[in-house]
Image (tube, grey):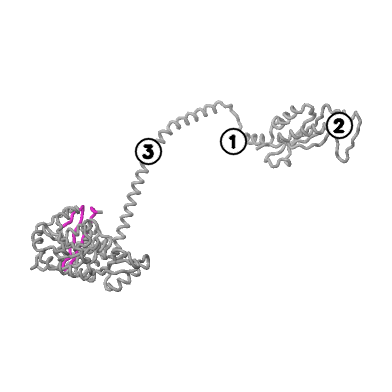
Amino acid sequence: MRLARKTLLFLTAHHFQAYSWHKGRLSEACTFALDADGRKQFLEFLQQHREPAYLLVDVIEEDFRRDFVPHLSGKNRRELIQRKFDQHYRNTLFRQATVLHRRTDGRRDDEMLFSALTNPQHISPWLDILETLGIPLTGIYSLPGISTQLIKDIDSEHILLLSWEKHAGLRQTYFNQKHLHFSRLTPISENSSFGESITAETPRTQHYLNSLSLPPHGETLDVFVICHANDRPSLKAALHSTPGLRYHYLDIAALGIYNLSRTPYPDSDATTLFLRLLAQKPSSSHYANSTHTHYHLLWQLRSILFGLAAIITLASAVWSGIAFMRGRNYASEAAPLMLQATQLASQSEEIKSRFPVTLTPANDMKTAVILMRKFEKYFPPPEEILRDLSSVLDMFDRIRPGRIAWQTSGTDAAPSAYPAQVITLDGELLDFGGDYRSALEYLERFQQALARHGYTVTAQKSPLDISPKGSISNDPQSSSGKWAQFTLQLVWRKIE
């Protein structure tokens, strides 16, 4: 932002000047009269310079008041500050409040500095022109606030900074512990020299500070004078330090070099020095309110949107480049696969050409294959149904199968989706010998073995009829004959 184009405006009691700032250089001043013609010329100037504007004000009508207020935050703090503004500066909108420090005793109140530009009619006409053209106004700054940057490295708690601005006068600004407390501007008459004005005005400022007990009794006030090297001998001859007052001299050219200034300083006029400070490091506190800075906020939003658009464009370009490179890699990797697919298609056509000629359409053949596969699921081959039964019969050598029959049954299929196979097994038990208990136990183990292999077993006929309608006989012929026969019903379900 230091190198961006800016328009710097400088307003004093009798002069209004505009400067262009670009790449760290300050242009020559364009001066406008404080009348209708001057405002017309200023409007024409702004039509050619639509960059963000910074207004620096150096006028006598700037008031400073210190006050202690309760330490508040949020809405309560804003309402308190507004009441103070209405109390002290009801007739101006150019006002600000700055916290100096917080007390460590009592209620721990905040010490605040309230300040305002008390002659708004002197500033408003120029702001109206800026608003008419939609020029983004960054802020309205006063010279005392900008000068804070010059004393940040000075080792002193009580500093009185003196500067001379050719079109304004002698500016005296007091800092207590690096915080601005008050400032006063004194016009310099043509008959008075720089040194004579300092000699006359410094005691008055010191007397005012003493009335405020600043600095405290026993402490020294350090007066720093911004001057050109050619003016230093005469100033030293005219200004004499006392036990409570010490004079120091800040070379204006050295300050310019320290702040990377390329502007020459032919005399002690510090106007361009403060304008450069404003362009490089504008203060966060100023007198403009949200109405004054409305167009600057829009300008910032537009800049942010342009920045986001540039970032998105750059990211899209990078992503497109990456996607293009990946596409080339994929194309090179796909070439062998395409060649292989072509070869497989050629081989497939060659194999199909060897098939015998048939009048059956391909769709009918496909349908037949699908139906056949479904048929195989619903009607499994006998070896699949009887494989486990054969294994169990191998383990029970006393059982001799007779007739084996099976049929499909949909009622016994649950929970399977396929029909169940109902097997009827007629057999007989060898070596029966009339021992019913042994025969029944052997047959029971046979049924349990079948159940473990997935069959659902139901005994339809046993060697011994134990039903209410059956009878028991000791006939040896019966014991060695039909009573050893049995019939089992086995239900086999397909495992999904």
Position in image of residue 330 (x %, y %): 41, 36
Rendered residue at 34%/44% (across/down): 317
- The residues tagged by marks 1 and 3 sit, at their Cα atoms, a distance apart of 44 Å
Report the side of 437 relative to 318 (left or right).
Answer: right
Q: Which residue is mark 2?
A: 483
Depth check: give the residue in front, 178 or 322: 178
Q: Which residues are magenta?
A: 2-27
Q: Amino acid at mark 1?
A: Asn
Which quadrant would residue 212 be assigned to in this image? bottom left
Which quadrant would residue 386 be assigned to in this image? top right
Rendered residue at 83%/34% (across/down): 462
Q: Which residue is mark 1?
A: 363
Labels 3, 2: front one: 2
Labels 1, 3: front one: 3
Is residue 157 magenta-colored? no
Report the side of 454 relative to 96 (left or right).
Answer: right
Q: Tell me if I can see residue 120 in this picture.
A: no
